[in-house]
Amino acid sequence: MSRLFKSIILTVLLGSIPVSVPAFSLLGPFDTWQAANIGYQLPGDIGGPMNLAEEYRWDVPTIVYAFDTSFLNYFGQRGVDEVDKAFAILNNLPPVSKMSSNLTEYPLEARRINYLAQSLGIVDLKSTVLGLIVEQMGLAEPIRYTWCLRARGTYTVGGQTYTNYLVIKRNFDPVSWTNSSYVNGILYTYQIEEPLLPGNYADAVEQTVDPLLSVFRVPVSAGGVLVGEYLTSLTRDDIGGLRYIYRSDNYNIETLPPGITNTLYGGGGGYTFYFPTNYTQTNSLTNLIVNLTNAFLVTGLRPGLDKITFQKGNYDSVMGRLFLTNIFDYTDIVISNNYALQQQVRRVVTTPDIIFLAGDLGVIMGTMIAPVQLQRGSGFVSYAQTNAQMAAAGPGIIQGTINFAFTTLYPTYYNDTADYFLTEDAAYRSVVWGSFDGSTNTPVIYPDYISIRDIERQVLRR
């Protein structure tokens, strides 16, 4: 048998074997080298891609979200229900320790199209919120950061100036933790482009090696949805990233956030000690236990929480301003003197960790004028110096309160003198907020006083 024929047979056989090639990127505060001129700190960015061991995560097991009056006035109860559905997708996930090693129980595709909503320019509220939450759990856009510029420089030879670029990866395989060029099974390469406008910056722009692969394999952590798109779940990529961040053998030195106190005996005695089976007690360890009796370890080496739960909180029903306090008792695990200690703690939540709002967020000025669609904050708290002597961007924790604000300007109408006719009929209508799924149900349009019939009339007039 010829060598060429053997190679062809081997290629066919390898191509028929299903291969899981997901990957994830980590999000944190911008590192010192992540400058705007090489593709970071762009409008809308809240952080940059982190390296392994630089992850940021929540360090409390229950995160409280609530709705400001402004959100309720614009989106109504239906909007609240859609946000609840987004959180339910995350709440229904098992602890990361219960997930399979290769994560094949999770899909590579989670995006679907509602063609009526697409033709009418409707953006799904639930799917938008789901992307925002995944970002705030510590995941960055894996496609954008598969290839990154680390540095850009120039030099001159013979009067001719040249530009050179240093490219790195910030995308990781969730099983081996090695750098990966794949996102949900799609292989990406790059093309350095400069200048990219607006902003006049350089970037290693990702390109699919096979352009015929499914466009629906974009992970939820890639951020946002297009008009007519809706999300049914998280993808394998997203799950792999969350497992890396929140696994129980991921230990970082962390400080408990404000509002947490020890619940046993006014601050003492809340410990359970774990000793090896062949352990022989000594006086020194007895003294250690005595000394720890009244201790409360606020800062210490802590594992990932394995499972994060989101719970809806409420403001008072009269003024919508006074937040109703939530109290959570849970077991905090901290490593001290090479032993895993359990301390019973209480967290009093007087302000939601996440608040949903709506309002006029302003407009983007440029060649075209458009409303600012979203604004969201970040809650990064770095413990990089606490965890290591070497300078790094992380690890750290995420703390509230984090605001998610949605524009109330939709729909808007854009006129340009280049079109000559500055009339309603010549205007370009913006997208609108809505809710829809894969059923035959008519999409819901926000705010409540705008109907699907109004949107259809505007589209047909155009």
Image (spheres, rainbow, N blue to C red):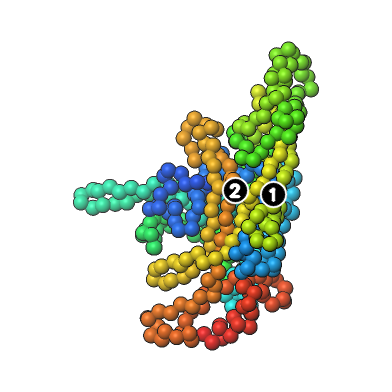
Disc number at residue 325? 1
| Distance from the alpha carbon under mark 2 to that under mark 1 | 15 Å
Q: Is residue 322 visible?
A: yes
Q: For the point 59% across and 73% down, which residue is it?
A: 122
Residue designated by label 2:
400
Q: For the point 54% across and 75% down, which residue is it?
A: 411
Q: For the point 44% across and 53% down, which residue is it?
A: 41
Q: Position of residue 296 (x, y in %)?
A: 67, 29
Q: Is residue 440 above or below residue 328?
A: below
Amino acid type assigned to the residue bearing label 1 in the image = Thr
In terms of secondary structure, where does tag 1 sit?
loop
- Foreground: 353 or 51? 353
Q: For the point 72% across and 44% down, which residue is it?
A: 328
* Dot in front, 2 or 1: 1
Mark positioned earlier in the residue sequence (2 or 1): 1
> Picture quarter containing residue 417?
bottom left
Q: Are marks 2 and 1 in contact (CB under 8 Å)?
A: no
- Foreground: 207 or 429? 429
Q: Residue furthest front?
A: 318
Disc number at residue 266? none
In terms of secondary structure, where does tag 2 sit?
loop
